[in-house]
Amino acid sequence: MHSNPEPRDDQPRPDRLVVLGTGGTIAGRADQRGDHVGYRAGEVAVADLLAGIPVPVGWRVQAEQLAQIDSKDIGPGVWRLLLARVRELLDQADIGGLVITHGTDTLEETAYLLQRVLAPAKPVVLTCAMRPATALAPDGPQNLADALVVAAEPGARGVVAVCAGRIHSGLALRKVHHYRLDAFDSGDAGPLGLVEQGVCTGFQPWPVAEAADCRLRPLWLDRLLGSQSWPRVECLFSHGAADGWLVRALLAQDALQGPERADRLRGLVVAGTGNGTLHADLLAALLEAQAAGVRVWRTTRCASGRVLLAASSPDLVPAVALAPAQARLALLLDLLRA
Ligand code: SIN
């Protein structure tokens, strides 16, 4: 992994890591110790999760409970809290990095949003668990210990996720399994590195700011933090018999409510078949949506891989090389530039 420049000798070396709790299975509680499914996410306080977890040598660790939710229910409210608090904490010179405990279900969305909007020069490490804190053999404690190791790693930067000993870029990861402890994958990009026995081994550089985003980040922060309603972007799939009924229903609903509403439909992400191909009848409806002013992007519904553009065929609906839920956020950010 490529490193940041070391702090100059006249600058105090950061010695504080902060763990922000947001809930998830890692903070989940079940009535039976053997129950890995019927638990309640987001019940155990983040300070309690840290009990007995090794603290990297030379660092102090503090816990802060930012939210306590099942991450399937995340939305602009918690994302706004995270964006604001992460930015505020990272501005403090004695803080070297952050860990965020988060549910696995939408972790890829939060990681993507934080990296695109903040692109931090310090590490922001999301971690999680597939078994609740009350399980016979919970995976959360090891993931949390590994996340602290990554947050304390010299030169670490950017938003990453640590799960089952693997470090994933916040821009590439995707939840690929509903039950396995190693539930995440970085697709063809592969993981950034590993954490084994408290040691990081890197294969790829830490995530850095996308060049085109640098100019936009202050505007995004201003608009995301300042507005209660973010642009409405909905997701749908192409599938057998996809005849565009859903798209036309959305357009009709919008027409009924009037075009001036803040929560009107602004974008659609369609997860196409294979290389992002769309049922011809769905495509016809999507072109109607585009004509009505709705931005439409397509991606693939395949669990892995990305859409490849053919130079020869006209791109009626622009394609994006992201998982559908991340593509939704990417389109939302794009709409905020306008
Ligand atoms: C959640 O996403 O909050 C629940 C599921 C999990 O963390 O694995």
Image (tube, rainbow, N blue to C red):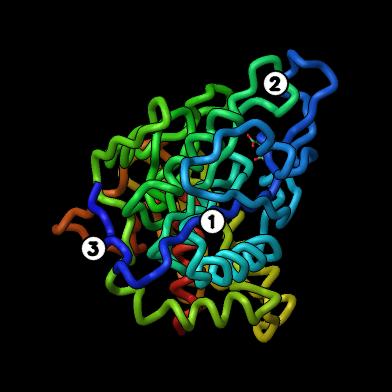
The kind of secondary structure element at disc 3 is loop
Q: Residue at x 51, y 49 (%)?
A: 59
Element class at badge 2: loop
Which of disc 2 and disc 3 is earlier in sequence?
A: 2
Real-space CA distance between mark 3 and mark 2, rounded to the nearest whole angstrom:
48 Å
Q: Nearer the viewer, mark 1 or mark 2?
A: 1
Residue mark closest to the camera, 3 vs 1: 1
Three-letter amino acid code of the residue under disc 3: Pro
Residue 45, compared with residue 208, is above or below; it is above
Residue at image coords 46%, 68%: 118
**Disc 3 vs disc 2: which is toward the camera?**
2
Residue receiving disc 3: 314
Q: Is residue 290 left or right of residue 234?
A: left
| C-alpha span from label 1 to label 2 | 33 Å
Badge 3: residue crowd in 10 Å (few <14, some 14–19, many ≥20): few
- In this view, the residue in front, 58 or 170, is 58
Residue 16 is marked as 1
Mark nearer the N terminus (1 vs 2)? 1
> Please, is residue 242 above or below residue 269 in the view?
above
Q: Can I make out residue 225 in this image?
A: yes
Looking at the rendering, which quadrant does residue 303 occupy? top left
Residue 167 % position (x, y): 39, 39
Residue corresponding to mark 2: 36
